[in-house]
Image: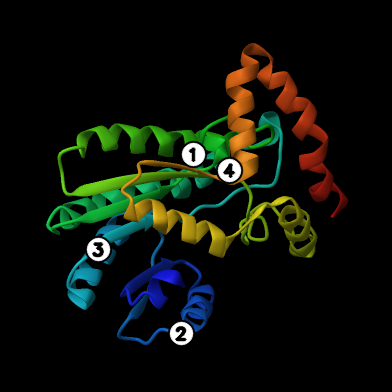
Amino acid sequence: MQLAAAGARLALCDVDMQGLAETHRLAQGTEKTISLHHVDVSNRKRMNEFALDILEEHGQVDLLINNAGISFTPTLFDDFSPEQFEKLLNINMWGVFNGIHAFLPHLRNRPEASIVNIASLAGLVGLYGYTPYSMSKFAVRGLSEALQSELVDSNVSLLVVYPGGIKTNIIKHAPDLADNQREAAHTTFSKSALLTSDDAARKILKAVKKKKNRLVLGNDAKLVNNLRRLLGQRFPAVINSIFSKAMFEGTQAS
């Protein structure tokens, strides 16, 4: 919304075209300023086609935001299937790679360009009940930090963002939820999320303008990240005591 309000031309992609249409409506953009594209970010061929579609339609790419992601509800490692791990990693990890692989050559052609990779608090510390999600976000962190070192002398800056809880629909759309559980789980998650999506977007865009390479978003993310440093060997036990009841409460009651 904020990019649209600033006059940016946007190319938005998702597998959910109905959701994209709603975003387009809220942004109050026109077909000339906002284009909508049905894209599965885990499909490398489709992502490469998407990049070419944007160049044809908009003429240039100056900012890539890798934000697509899914999460399962809190579940212990033994209860996750390999297929669930694979599904999540295909979107959260390979989707980021595919975006960079498709767009970086075109971003290099601009006088100045930026990449934003949305990681998570779960990319700073492994979160109880979120093993596949944490695995994917640590991968995003590693990719981002390694690539930042390669881009030091280039025209492309890369910001990696580590948000805590943001009031979005990520839990509402969790693949492992039954339809009758979605609203209750979403409500429980929203109560614990400290940031609105507008607040998060404003801070991210501010960091992009300043060419920052790292942004920890939200007091919850900062607190847990600091606890990790302070507690050392005791950290897993503390995280267990904090998250083991609270994070399962909402999904089991719904």
Mark 4 to mark 1 CA distance (whole Å): 15 Å
Tell me the quarter of the picture where residue 198 sits: bottom right
Above or below 146: residue 100: below
Please state, as top left, top right, bottom left or bottom right, where the C terminus lies in the image: bottom right
Secondary structure under tag 2 reads loop
Separation of disc 3 and disc 4 at Cα?
Answer: 28 Å
Badge 4 or badge 1: first in the primary sequence: 4
Look at label 2 and name its amino acid: Gln
SS at circle 4? helix
In the orientation shown, which residue stands out farthest toward the right? 253
Q: Which mark is residue 28?
A: 2
Q: Position of residue 38 (x, y in %)?
A: 40, 71
Q: SS for tag 3?
A: helix
Closest to the observer, 112 or 24: 112
Residue highlighted by disc 4: 84
Which numbered mark, 3 or 2, is in the foreground of this view?
2
Q: In this orientation, does residue 126 appear?
A: no
The residue at which mark 3 appears reads as 51
- Point out the tag, 2 or 4, that comes first from the N-terminus: 2
